[in-house]
Structure formats: structure tokens, C-alpha cells
Image: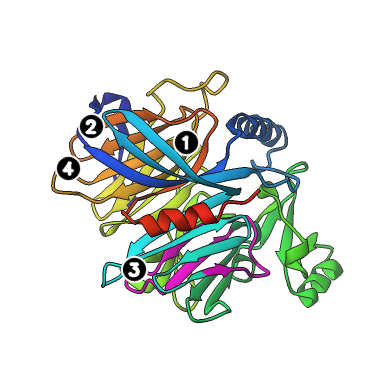
Amino acid sequence: MPPPIEHIDLSRFQRDPHFYGSLELLVTIKSFDLQAIRKRYLESRARAGASGGRTGSVERRRPSQGGVARVRLEAGTCDAEVLARMTEPRGIDLVEDRQRRLHAAIAAESTVHWYRPQDRRRLQHPWFSYLHTVQFHPTDPERLVVSSSGFDWIGAFHADAEQPVRTWLAWEHGFDQGMDPESGKPYRLTRNPETARRYAAEGTPCLLVEDPPSEAIPTARRAAFINSVAYDPMDADALLATFFHEGAVYRIDANGKSERLLEGLKNPHGGRRRGVGIMATSTASGEIVERDATGIRRWQFAHLGGKAPGLEDREWIQNTCVVPAAADRNEVLVAIDANRTCFTVLDTANGLLNQVPFPQDWAVQDLVPALPNAGLDAWIRGLASG
């Protein structure tokens, strides 16, 4: 029997700018030209509708100038400081170790910047492309997992090792079917020349990636488009991966076997645990979706209004973070609402909501609760480029 589904209309929540006190976040801004991204997005939707193909870019575009900012949300206002401008930062994560020392990581295009108490590292790898997320291991901040969306590749790293200690390529685990976005016809992806020769002999269309640093696969042409990966706190040897094109969150065990935990999503981001349940942002349907033992809840943004002209029938909730409860407030969710250019703060237990506008030109990609640390801000400022 399928689990019961509860649809929750967020427009029925009580609007209150004070229930969350003051929230401090670090956010990544993929680009400071949100209008250009919206234009590409609408063109992509029109193209996908005409061909029956996938949404997303069809050609390798030039990376954008973005940045990392510290923001404070309080009483319905956003106080923001851009700490650094750099090439297309997307993922960010912070954690404290047992000695309360801060560890941080930022994924920017094809480089991971890693901040440790004793040193600073830069991770680069041939299979890094369109990096989307970084996340620390729940019990060991010396371990970090990275989603390389451009190649449907996952890499887990240890601070003392130059090479990844674990990798997972979707193409070699049953997720190797790309799609030509113009014709809507499928093809296979591989990095194995022998496999490519076999496909050629069979007459199966195939894309062989032999030299990843010199090749790129735009969004619409990817197979899985894994745009987030996280360690699973319920089994720290397992990973939670979000598949954008399929609209699902998978659990990948230590042997590489995958199990679908959450489905029925549209262009999702940010699959993660919330307690014992699994939560993700169903980006293009405008929902936060959570599944646990009691059923499925879908918090829906569609009736909130306030979207930019031309986007009235479109939703794009980029990602959502969980801010743990504090002495003066409950646990809250903070969602990035790209089409309304605001952060939406939610107390789902008590039905409270506040929309906090952010700068209109920001394409906010990821966010994480900030931790006070002057050294961290100085490090981020030092990453500025371009």
C-alpha cells in the first residue's frame, strides 16, 4: 500500500517576522546576474516542451562570477555582506569537531576549498566538473564527500589523502542513459573505450568521455545529474544522492548498490535526513517533500504569490536547509525561493512563515547555518578571484 500523502498549502501558514529571532547563514551565490539565468531557464523549458526532452543547458556555457555572503535574517529583513567574489561557487558546509574547532568547505566550479583548524587545502580532480555540493562526514570532519554533477560522479575524500578514498560513477551503476535535448532521443554515456566500441558495433548512440578535464556535459545531456550528495547519519558508510533528471533521492551503500528512498520530485536538490525521515526540495514543483514512517508531507509554495513577471506559473525553490532548534526558537527550515527572490523561513510544527527578500540580482545556490569564526571570514575573503 502506498504511503499516505499530505499536501500542505504554505499560503495558509501564519505570517510572522519574529518567530525565528535572528538567523545567521552563509550562502553561496552562483551568479550576480539572476536575470540571465531566468532567461536561459525559460528558453530551456520552451525547448524541452517542444522536443519532449530534458530541461537545462545544451551547450557548455562560460562559468559565471558569483560569491559567498554572510547574511542575517531578523524581523523580516536581510542584512548581507558579500565576503568574496569567485567563479561559480555552489556548495558549502560547516561543522565543528569535538574540540569545537571549525571545519568548512566550499565547492566552486571545479575546485573544493577546504578550511581546517591546522591548514587550508584545495582539492582538484580530473572528474570535477560543475561541482554542486560538499558535505562533511557526520562523525569525522576529516572526511568530505563531493558531488561532481557535470560527470554524474561522486568522490569521498580524506584530509590526509591526495586521491579520493571512494568514488561512484552513475554510468557504471545502471544510470548511463543520457538524452539529446533537441531530438529527445537517448544515448549511452561511458568512460570505457571497450564499452564504447561494443555500443558502436550494436548501433547504439554513445558518448565516450576519455579525457574529463577537457570535456564537459551540459545539464540537459547528463544521465543522472547528481546535484547533491550527503553522508547518511543513520549509516555513515552510506550516501544520499539527489538525481535531478529522475526526480528522486537514492541511498548508495558501501558496496555501491543504490536504493530509491524518495521519488515523485521535479528537478530536486538537497536530499538529506531530517531526523529519521528523508527530505528534499522538489525545485520545479515548488515543494519541500519529506517522507518518514508516518507518510509523505509536501509543503507547497505555489499559492504564495509575489513572483517576478513572466514566472507566474513557474516555481524554483533552489534548496532548503534545516536550522536546529535553539533556546529561543524551534527548529526551522530556510528555503531559497529563486522566483520570488527571497528566503522563506518556516516553522512547520506551528504553521509559521516569513518571506525575507534578498538582493534581486542574486542567484542563491546553497546555504548553511553560520558559526561565529573570524578566521573563517578572513579565509573566505582570501578566496576572491576574478
Residue 107, numbered label = none
Residue type at mark 1: give it.
Answer: Ser
**Mark closer to the chain start, 1 or 2:** 1
Residue at the location (37% across, 66% down)?
232
Closest to the observer: 79 or 233? 79
Q: Is residue 365 above or below residue 161?
A: above
Earlier-in-chain disc, 4 versus 1: 1
Residue 237 lies, with reference to residue 46, above or below; the image says below
Which sits earlier in the primary sequence, circle 4 or circle 3? 3
Number of other residues with Cα within 10 Å of mark 3, as a class: few under 14, some 14 to 19, many 20 or more: some
User: Foreground residue, 328 or 2?
Assistant: 328
346 w.r.t. 172: above or below: above
Residue 335 placed where, x, y %? 38, 40
Q: Considering the numbered disc 1 on the image, is that residue within a helix, a strand or a loop?
A: loop
- First of labels 3, 1 by sequence position: 3
Q: CA distance from mark 3 to mark 1?
A: 30 Å
Q: Which residue is mark 3?
A: 138
Disc 4 to disc 1, how far (Cα)?
A: 29 Å
- Gap between marks 2 and 3, in whole Å? 29 Å
Residue hosting label 2: 352
Residue receiving disc 1: 285
Secondary structure under tag 3 reads loop
Q: Which residues are magenta?
A: 121-148
